[in-house]
């Protein structure tokens, strides 16, 4: 059995590497959000700042490892064979949970996941022990460190509301003082902001970085033989005051003499600091459990006592984590940061929700988001009735954005300005350093995300056009956090029970299932990313000239035709076989296509502003194109709905003759769509377009003949009203679909002919 435990410890080490990878993919949003959103540095430089911060943070995170060892449960109440299964269940659950959230692109809390996994697994193991020893459930307090667990959980939950509120308040005050023209403010005012911001970040680095290193307890002569920790704690006010004065003078010098951008410096240093905090605070979430398992295994092997008799009381002792482990973990985190595409997806979610301008809103409004928006609009209206009109006008002037240039590309604009990016970093840094000084292991994800959302609200980024979507997005993310807690505790408990009753064989089975799930998610994610990149490029028209618009819309129409035909094929396949799956897929794809076209329509304002002044005809052409695409997508959505509903409601399936006729129509449409796709792919070959237009009459004649045939069948042999209604509607809407497809070709061909 000794070899089995060694195998589990080795497996935990491998899981730690996997957990580091999925954990960094999730938590990169914590420190990359502000720098990427403000676009003050190249992506490469941002990653360099973050990488250095991660390495320093990882090396200084030894003290936080105690949470995994004794923060949630009482180790002395468990034996080695029990504790090793608790640790195994925690790591299995963690890697599954984080990979799931990364795949769907939602930031979740690694701190919450590890805390609730430890809690769930420990509670289930404790209940097993209580039942087997005929104890009462009231004895659970003996096994679980309820006071500490409650403190951690409350600290994490409170951080959500505190971070949002303080982020909103500080951003509102800053915007009132600095406005959107903050770079043109007086040197002393920008120096004051720089001094406060850099002093806060410097204090944050001291608390999160230096105080966590093994060297912080060394006595230094220059500090009158005090340790660094002791000196900082004893002279905290003096250190902070000196820091503010120094950084104020530094800001004044770099602004006045060197003409440097102080906001750029704040964002660079802040990114480094938050990356340091992430590694220092959250590394325990990924390797704390495997390290505790390794140290437990070492202690048990040296004891010579049987695994089921060896008490784990030694975990109550403070044991330093080997620096080599921390350094290697830091390297793995850095490599993941550079190469993880899932990290970019999670960051994008946060950036979209805090974007100052209109963007693709990936979240759908719901009853709660609409109600909250209405409530706060009502509150805002009531406040306006109390305040003097002059004050309201003055405040509104502070929030007036700098107008965009007519030829400014929406894709090149930052999601928010440097002032908001700086506030995001400074407020998050202050809150995290404050919690760390109070020894509260809060969630850095909760703090940084909610600060970003609070500053977005205060900065009026959530306008009347986007508020319901943004609020719905925030509610989705917060809901995901509660889901994390529930899933972490329940899945952790289930797995530890299975391990307890099944032993090493169950470990192998569960690991095989985990590898299958993660492998499948990885392959699906890569395919999805590749498809999205290709489609995004085709569906975005960025040219500002008439000729450029014509060229780019050709690619757009080609892609829409390709997607439309795929949907139509799925519908014919589902109706022919009377199977629901192809129809479900068709309905989903039709809905996605309709959303993409709606996004194109939503960007019409920016498209028109981006055009050259002489390209009015390009605007007219593009508006007509969007109308045709909209009609086409509506036809597909309707066909998908009636087909899905018919089969889903178990109505009478289509007859063999009807299926045969639909397949004939599909064959005709295949030819039309194929030739149309080739025409748009070939660019501006007029001969190709003329050949497509020749197919119009024959396609209409075929459908009309089938409609007439069905009328005759209905008067004679047909007995199913539902079947007849579906077939007529499908044929009529197919005719509309072809009509709108030919409209696209005709409009494009007309423009090409003129050129």
Image (cartoon, helix red, strand yellow):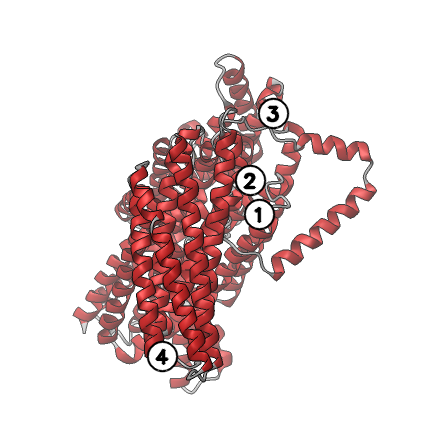
Foreground disc of the pair 4, 1 = 4
Residue 176's quadrant in the figure? top right
Q: Position of residue 365 (x, y in %)?
A: 57, 56
Residue 330, visible in the rendered structure: no
Q: Which residue is mark 1?
A: 163
Distance between mark 4 and mark 2 Cα atoms:
67 Å
Q: SS class of the residue under badge 2? A: helix
Residue 389, visible in the rendered structure: yes
Question: Badges 1 and 3: C-beta atoms under 8 Å apart?
Answer: no
Q: SS class of the residue under badge 3? A: loop
Q: Position of residue 580 (x, y in %)?
A: 38, 73
Distance between mark 4 and mark 1 Cα atoms:
62 Å
Q: Which residue is mark 3?
A: 181
Q: State the residue lying farthest toward the top.
A: 257
Q: Position of residue 702 (x, y in %)?
A: 36, 63
Front-most of 54 and 483? 483
At horizontal 25% and vertical 76% (from top left) the residue drawn is 503
Foreground disc of the pair 4, 2 = 4
Q: Which residue is mark 2?
A: 427
Q: SS class of the residue under badge 1? A: helix
Q: From the viewer's perspective, is residue 455 above or below residue 468?
A: above
Q: Which mark is residue 655?
A: 4
């Amino acid at each position: 059995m000794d070899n089995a435990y060694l195998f589990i410890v080795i497996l935990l080490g491998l899981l730690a590497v996997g957990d580091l990878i999925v954990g960094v993919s999730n938590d990169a949003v914590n420190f990359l959000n502000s720098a990427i959103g403000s676009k003050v540095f190249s992506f490469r430089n941002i990653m360099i700042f973050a990488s250095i911060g991660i390495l320093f943070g990882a090396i200084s995170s030894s003290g936080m490892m105690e949470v995994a060892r004794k923060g949630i449960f009482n180790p002395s109440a468990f034996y080695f064979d029990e504790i090793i299964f608790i640790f195994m269940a925690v790591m299995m659950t963690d890697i599954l949970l984080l990979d799931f959230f990364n795949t769907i692109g939602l930031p979740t809390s690694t701190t919450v996941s590890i805390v609730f996994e430890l809690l769930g697994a420990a509670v289930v193991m404790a209940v097993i022990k209580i039942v087997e020893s005929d104890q009462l459930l009231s004895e659970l307090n003996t096994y679980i460190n309820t006071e500490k667990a409650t403190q951690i959980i409350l600290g994490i939950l409170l951080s959500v509301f505190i971070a949002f509120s303080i982020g909103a308040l500080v951003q509102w005050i800053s915007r009132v003082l600095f406005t959107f023209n903050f770079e043109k403010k007086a040197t002393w005012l920008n120096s004051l902001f720089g001094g406060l911001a850099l002093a806060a970040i410097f204090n944050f680095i001291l608390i999160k970085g230096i105080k966590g290193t093994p060297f912080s307890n060394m006595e230094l002569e220059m500090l009158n033989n005090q340790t660094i920790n002791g000196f900082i704690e004893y002279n905290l006010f003096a250190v902070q005051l000196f820091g503010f004065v120094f950084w104020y003078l530094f800001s004044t010098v770099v602004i006045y003499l060197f003409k440097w951008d102080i906001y750029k410096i704040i964002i660079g240093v802040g990114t480094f600091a938050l990356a340091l905090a992430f590694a220092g605070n959250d590394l325990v979430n990924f390797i704390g459990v495997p390290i505790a398992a390794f140290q437990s295994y070492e202690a048990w092997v040296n004891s010579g006592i049987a695994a089921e008799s060896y008490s784990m009381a030694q975990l109550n002792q403070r044991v330093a984590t080997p620096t080599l482990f921390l350094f290697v973990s830091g390297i793995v985190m850095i490599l993941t940061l550079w190469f993880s595409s899932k990290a970019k997806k999670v960051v994008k979610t946060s950036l979209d929700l805090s974007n100052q301008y209109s963007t693709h809103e990936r979240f759908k409004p719901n009853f709660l988001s609409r109600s909250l928006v209405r409530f706060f609009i009502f509150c805002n209206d009531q406040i306006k009735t109390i305040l003097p009109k002059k004050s309201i006008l003055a405040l509104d002037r502070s929030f007036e954005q700098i107008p965009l240039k007519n030829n400014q590309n929406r894709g090149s604009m930052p999601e928010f300005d440097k002032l908001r990016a700086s506030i995001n970093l400074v407020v998050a840094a202050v809150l995290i350093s404050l919690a760390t000084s109070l020894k509260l292991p809060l969630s850095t994800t909760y703090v940084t995300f909610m600060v970003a959302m609070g500053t977005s609200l205060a900065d009026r980024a959530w306008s009347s056009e986007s508020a319901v979507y943004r609020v719905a997005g925030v509610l989705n993310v917060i809901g995901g956090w509660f889901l994390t807690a529930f899933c972490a505790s329940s899945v952790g408990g289930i797995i530890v029970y299975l391990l307890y009753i099944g032993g090493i064989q169950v470990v192998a089975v569960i690991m095989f299932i985990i590898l299958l799930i993660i492998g499948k998610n990885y392959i699906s994610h890569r395919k999805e990313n590749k498809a999205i990149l290709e489609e995004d490029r085709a569906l975005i028209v960025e040219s500002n000239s008439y000729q450029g618009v014509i060229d780019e819309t050709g690619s757009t129409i080609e892609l829409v035709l390709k997607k439309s035909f795929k949907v139509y094929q799925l519908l014919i396949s589902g109706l022919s076989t009377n199977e629901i799956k192809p129809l479900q897929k068709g309905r989903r794809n039709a809905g996605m296509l309709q959303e993409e076209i709606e996004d194109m329509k939503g960007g019409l304002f920016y498209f028109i502003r981006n055009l050259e002044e002489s390209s009015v005809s390009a605007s007219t052409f593009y508006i007509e194109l969007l109308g045709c695409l909209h009609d086409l997508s509506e036809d597909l959505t309707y066909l998908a709905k009636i087909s899905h509903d018919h089969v889903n409601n178990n109505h009478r399936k289509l007859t063999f003759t009807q299926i045969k006729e639909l397949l004939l129509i599909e064959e005709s449409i295949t030819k039309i769509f194929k030739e149309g796709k080739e025409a748009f792919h070939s660019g501006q070959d007029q001969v190709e377009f003329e050949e497509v237009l020749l197919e119009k009459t024959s396609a209409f004649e075929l459908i009309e003949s089938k409609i007439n045939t069905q009328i005759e069948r209905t008067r004679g042999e047909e007995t199913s009203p539902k079947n007849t209604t579906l077939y007529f509607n499908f044929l009529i809407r197919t005719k509309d679909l072809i009509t709108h497809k030919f409209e696209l070709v005709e409009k494009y061909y007309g423009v090409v002919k003129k050129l």
